[in-house]
Each structure stands twice: as structure tokens, then as C-alpha cells.
Image (cartoon, helix red, strand yellow):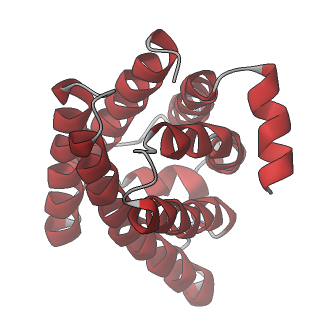
Amino acid sequence: MGKITDKFLRIAPGGYYGLLSASIRFTGDLLALLLFPDFDFTKNMISDLGVGPGAFFFKLGIILSGIVCIPFYVAFVRSLKINGIYEKTRTSSLIIFYIANTAYILIGIFPSDPSNYQIYLMHGIFAFIWVLATILFLLLFSFLMVKNKKFTNLPVYVSIFLIGCLILFLFTWVPIVEWILSLVVFIWFATTSSYLIYHKL
């Protein structure tokens, strides 16, 4: 995995993969939404797009964005290196990211289909794992950014805000909160990716 990721990072810096990943997901969601005329933001979870008329685009967007974001996260974790200290924390954050990202991709493979209980259950389990693992690796990322002089408070604050949204969603699990969470995820990707690009990290 490391050698493959390095090849992609030689083509373009990690921040560009973060922006590309977010763009792919946004496009997939938008196409699925446009093909779902009866979609109600107050009643339908985002996962309902995975069983709607545009399900193909929704699922493809999740899977591709999950794959494309890997070089971004690897570059991000490497940028958090601090003179050999907190190496276990840095390594742990990347491992937890891989767990979260695997669960994220599997969310796209197993749609939220209530007519198929086993697939529906798998979708819920992977979504739950994604939320928990994302909270954990964002906490570690935030800690490392605070300790690293290369990072200002902006990416830290955005990460903490995203953690708050994830926790709120975990305890509410309602459509409107999920949509707010998705918006904040896009903002986090845009902010963090742009920061890495601007500072050449």
C-alpha cells in the first residue's frame, strides 16, 4: 500500500487528492439527489440515495472517494511528524483512518436497503464503525496538529467542530443532522486539503 501511495504522491501533493475525493463524493451525491425527485431532506437519510433511482452514482461516489482520499490522509499523517516524538500516536491515527475508510467504502457496497435485512444491518454496522473511528482519528489528528508548529489553529478548530457534529449525529441519527454533518465534512476536506497545498505539506 505504501509504495502505491508514494507513486500517487509523486504525481500530485496529498492535498489535491483530498479535494478530488470531496469533489467525487459531492458529484455522486448530487447526481443521485437529482434523480430522486421525492427526496425529503427532513425525512430521508442520505443513505436512502443508495436505494433510489440514482443509487449507482451514490454508491460509486462513496467507493471512489474512499479510494482517492488515501494518498491525502497518508500525506496528512506524514506532515504531522514532530522530530520523532508522538510516533505511536501518529501511527495509530493512520491505522484508525484505514479502519474508518474501509467501513466508509463498505457503506457504499452495502446500501441501506430495508427490504434486505442482512444488507441493511451491515450498512448500519459499517456506518456506526465509520462514525466512531472517524471521531478517534480526528481527535488524534487534532492533538498532533496542536503539538506541531507547522499548523495554525484553523484546521484544528475545523476538526474539533467536525468531531462535535459526529458526536451529535451519533446520539441523534436524524436526517437534518446528517446533512449538516456532510456539509461540515466537505468544509473539513476543503480546509485541510487547501492548507496542505498552500503550505506545501
The furthest residue to the top? 198
Q: In this rendering, would 170 be left or right of 117?
A: left
Q: In this rendering, would 72 be left or right of 170?
A: right
Task: Between residue 39 and residue 91, name the one nearer to us.
Answer: 91
From the viewer's perspective, is residue 57 above or below residue 171?
above
Pinpoint residue 70: horizontal percent, then vertical percent.
65, 46
Examine the rendering and report whether any part of residue 90 can be seen. Answer: yes
Taking the spot 45% from the left edge, 10% from the top edge, the residue there is: 198
Position of the N terminus by quadrant: bottom right
Pinpoint residue 166: horizontal percent, then vertical percent.
24, 57
Name which quarter of the figure residue 132 lies in.
bottom left
From the viewer's perspective, is residue 191 above or below residue 145?
above
Taking the spot 45% from the left edge, 61% from the top edge, the residue there is: 87
From the viewer's perspective, is residue 46 above or below residue 112?
above
Examine the rendering and report whether any part of residue 43 can be seen. Answer: no
The furthest residue to the bottom? 118
From the viewer's perspective, is residue 96 above or below residue 4?
below
Task: Between residue 86 and residue 24, name the one nearer to us.
Answer: 86
Task: Between residue 19 and residue 194, name the one nearer to us.
Answer: 194
Task: Between residue 119 and residue 182, name the one nearer to us.
Answer: 182
Taking the spot 35% from the left edge, 39% from the top edge, the residue there is: 185
